[in-house]
Amino acid sequence: MGGAIVQHVNSSAELEKRAIDARPYYYIDHVSIEATDVQLTRNSWQIIMTSSNTLPYLEEIESHPQLMHSSLLTWFFEKFYDKFFSLCPEARNAFSAVSMVSQSRLMAGVISSSLGLLNRPVILAQRLVAMVIKHHQRGVRATQYSTMGEALLWTLAITLGDEFTTSVKNAWTRVYSHLLSIILPAAISAETNAVEFEPVNIKSTATEKHVHSRYK
Ligand code: HEM
């Protein structure tokens, strides 16, 4: 993607505006993650991590046995990256030298650990910001995280089929919006070379202890 792009801006209002502009259509503002969001996303992710028999997957391998995958998870990430590259063709080059099997394993691990850290918001935010800084060096831009979320929601829908209920969809949309509320300001800040940057969610979230009790 041609390396990190840095544009200078002068005010925090401008930074905020750019972070807002990078939000996707599905973004939910000021989301407060509830226990049901945690439960529904974790449970549905568990199905993808451990099962091999959701209906859409079974139907596809029945009609195209040559497409047999070693697990539902590999099927999931093949669909996910296909969708992401169709929405964001310029990202494909960045992955040209990458083993998509190991990349998929890494992504699976990050999704699992992010869901596991929803009740540890400070650690979650620190990890996301570190990820954004590293990705910025690769030339990844803020809007691409929004596009990746669209690919994620789409892939969850086609993988889970009827199990992607409205409640499950809402929970994933809320959780990814929450992640974006940390990722986008961090990415915009990196792009605009802001000197002082404190991600909004680290600054404004309640203490770990307080949040723990909300998620029980
Ligand atoms: C929430 C969103 C994302 C997460 C959690 C994530 C996570 C990861 C992880 C864990 C790795 C491997 C470890 C590392 O090198 O950092 C990685 C690598 C990478 N990611 Fe992402 N990523 C995200 C979004 C994106 C986006 C939007 C792009 C846009 C193209 C992207 C492009 C890459 C590339 C090119 C690599 C390097 C692969 C390699 O050279 O081995 N990522 N990502």
Image: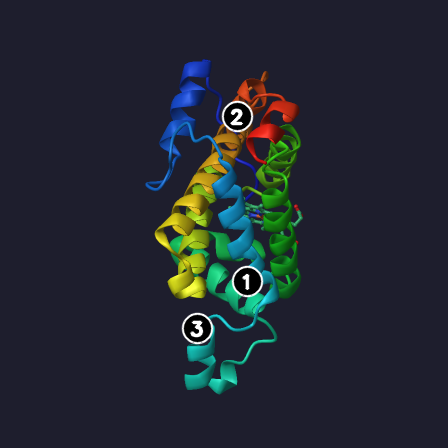
Residue 71, picture quadrant: bottom right
Q: To which residue does mark 1 refer?
A: 48
Q: To which residue does mark 3 refer?
A: 55
Where is residue 128? Give x, y as percent: 60, 36
Q: Is residue 202 above or below residue 47?
A: above
Residue 3, picture quadrant: top right
Q: Residues within 10 Å of mark 2 (few under 14, many from 20)?
A: many
Q: Residues within 10 Å of mark 1 (few under 14, many from 20)?
A: many
Ligand 1 within 8 Å of disc 3? The answer is no
Identify the residue shown where x is 53% and y is 43%.
38
Q: Secondary structure at mark 1?
A: helix
Identify the residue shown where x is 49% and y is 49%.
40
Amino acid at circle 1? Ile
Residue 174, picture quadrant: top left
Amino acid at circle 2? Ser
Mark 2 and mark 1 lie on one chain; the one further toward the N terminus is 1
Relative depth, front residue between 195 and 145: 145
